[in-house]
Amino acid sequence: MTTLSIVFDESRCINCKACEIHCRQWHGLPMSLCRHIGDAPRPDTEGVIRLRMGLLHCVQCLRPHCLSACTHEAMRLDEDGIVHIDAERCTGCGDCLAACPYHALCRHPQTGKVFKCDLCRDRRAQGEEPACVAGCLTHALRLSDSPDDYKHAGKAVARALKLSRG
């Protein structure tokens, strides 16, 4: 099984949120499946002003807690190791939301059903990049199938989650 992941290069990101906009537009959602997290610019240990940023998104866990928490069989793992949600089967109970350690699943405000990033399965099937990657103006995002990048992506999302909590 491959380990696809979106790799975020903080040094290239200008926090323009083009990735979020492209994601929302492609999926027709009121919110993005990825969220930029940033804090106020602060001096680092050398006195250089820096803006710490992160990207919160589904890291496509190897043993997804959301999948095992879903009691309605609305979630499935595909051959690429990506968890998909069958909207027809999803009841919106939220068990998967509570199970995700990265808080990467969202509840649709109109339908109440849960949705998550599947790395734009439809776009990848046509040989295209995920919408967020394609929309990134500074190439701070890239899709990778490298196991090393997969490990790095998970750690980066964990740091972003910590940053979001202050």
Image (cartoon, helix red, strand yellow):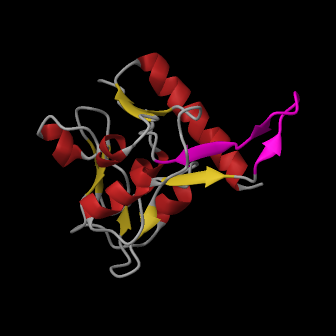
Residue at 14% x, 39% y is 125
x%, y% of residue 27?
27, 61
The residue shown at (29%, 50%) is 84
Please check the rendered image and state whether residue 154 is part of the magenta-colored stretch, yes or no.
no
Q: Can residue 58 be seen here? A: yes
Q: Is residue 107 above or below residue 145?
A: below
- Where on the picture, by quarter, is residue 105? bottom left
Residue at the far front: name it.
Answer: 48
- Asked if residue 33 shows in the view, the reply is no
In the rendered image, residue 91, in percent from the top left (x then y), is placed at 33, 73
Image coords of residue 75 (percent x, y): 31, 54
Say which of 146 and 38 sits in front.
38
Q: Nearer the viewer, residue 18 or 90?
A: 18
Q: Is residue 119 left or right of residue 164?
A: left
The N terminus, quarter of image: top left
How many discs appear? 0
**For residue 47, side relative to residue 117 (left or right):** right
Vertically, is 133 above or below 151? Answer: below
Judge whether 42 appears above or below 71 on screen: above
Q: Position of residue 13 (x, y in %)?
A: 53, 40
| Start-end of magenta stretch | 41-57
Residue 49 sits inside the magenta stretch: yes
Report the quarter where the C terminus lies: bottom right
Q: Given the current orientation, which residue lies at the most extreme left position? A: 126
Residue at 45% x, 64% y is 106
